[in-house]
Image: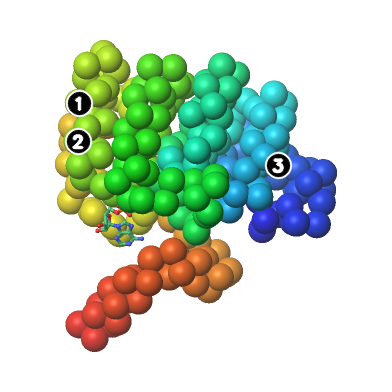
Amino acid sequence: LTHFGLDFSERACRGYVAEVVAEAKRLNNSVEVDMEAYPYVEPTLRTVVDLHERFGCVRAVIQAYLRRSEADIERLCGLGIPVRLCKGAYKEPASVAFTRKREVNENYRRLAALLLEKGVQPAMATHDERIIADVIRMAGERGVAPDGLEFQMLYGIRRSLQRRLVSEGYRVRLYVPYGVAWYPYFMRRLAERPANLLFLIRNLLRR
Ligand SMILES: Cc1cc2nc3c(=O)[nH]c(=O)nc-3n(C[C@H](O)[C@H](O)[C@H](O)COP(=O)(O)OP(=O)(O)OC[C@H]3O[C@@H](n4cnc5c(N)ncnc54)[C@H](O)[C@@H]3O)c2cc1C
């Protein structure tokens, strides 16, 4: 939402995003509202709840590293708002977030189980194959059919896994950056995972 001016005015930002969501609804489509750093969690969730009430075709994002996320998931599920669960991409203080990888992964599994039990169109955004295997097992134990579960990954990452999930009947949605403002997006992804710079250089040299 910061790309829609959230830092300047929540009201104006909501108005701009509402135009996008209205157009998505007209096209029988939906909009997923990314979650950014901690100070934006409250205004982002407020905006998603408002858009859900007005249009219905929005999905919220919850970050498994945040300590507050279980309560947020309970609330969103109670309101019938679909949720995408990701681990979380920003550097947050221990006062609000789990900082150890193991704790984040444990919380991801706990929140995924909650979403499988109470969520509407649950979506798991991760490339972590162990977590994906656990989510599939938990979904089976809870009687969630493959087409009732969505996995989300970045375009180009873990392609064979993406194909395998599709062949097994799961929904797979890919996060694809597009448009002219590719540079800030690219820099954000590099900051999130500096190892991608090596990945890029290796692939450039291979060509
Ligand atoms: C569809 C989608 C939407 C997202 N939306 C948000 C959001 O709204 N807010 C937010 O805070 N975060 C978001 N994220 C990022 C997320 O929070 C994680 O930072 C990111 O997905 C890495 O975590 P992981 O679950 O893949 O597990 P990790 O344990 O980080 O990674 C597991 C394995 O996947 C591979 N991998 C993971 N990421 C990459 C990459 N970028 N490039 C190459 N290989 C990789 C690596 O081999 C790694 O070993 C999103 C991620 C995805 C896939």
Residue at numbered disc 2: 133
Task: Estimate how packed mark 1 is, as few (under 14), some (14 to 19) or many (20 or more) residues with alpha carbons within 10 Å.
Answer: few
Q: Position of residue 1 (x, y in %)?
A: 66, 51
- Does mark 1 have its CB less than 8 Å from ligand 1? no
Taking depth in this image into account, of 73 and 65 the one nearest to the observer is 65
Residue at the location (58% across, 33% down)?
Answer: 58
- Decide: is 79 above or below 67: above
Disc 1 residue type (three-letter): Arg
Q: Distance between the residues labelled 1 and 3?
A: 34 Å
Quarter of the C terminus within the rendering? bottom left
- Decide: is 143 above or below 182: above
Residue at the location (26% across, 47% down)?
Answer: 128
Task: Estimate how packed mark 2 is, as few (under 14), some (14 to 19) or many (20 or more) residues with alpha carbons within 10 Å.
Answer: few
Taking depth in this image into account, of 176 and 7 the one nearest to the observer is 7
Q: Position of residue 201 (x, y in %)?
A: 30, 82
Residue at numbered disc 1: 137
Disc 2 residue type (three-letter): Ala
Residue at numbered disc 3: 43
**Pointers 2 and 1 in contact (CB under 8 A)?**
yes
Mark 3 / mark 2, whichever is N-terminal = 3
- Decide: is 2 above or below 11: below
Question: In the image, is 173 to the left or to the right of 1?
Answer: left
Taking depth in this image into account, of 30 and 100 the one nearest to the observer is 100
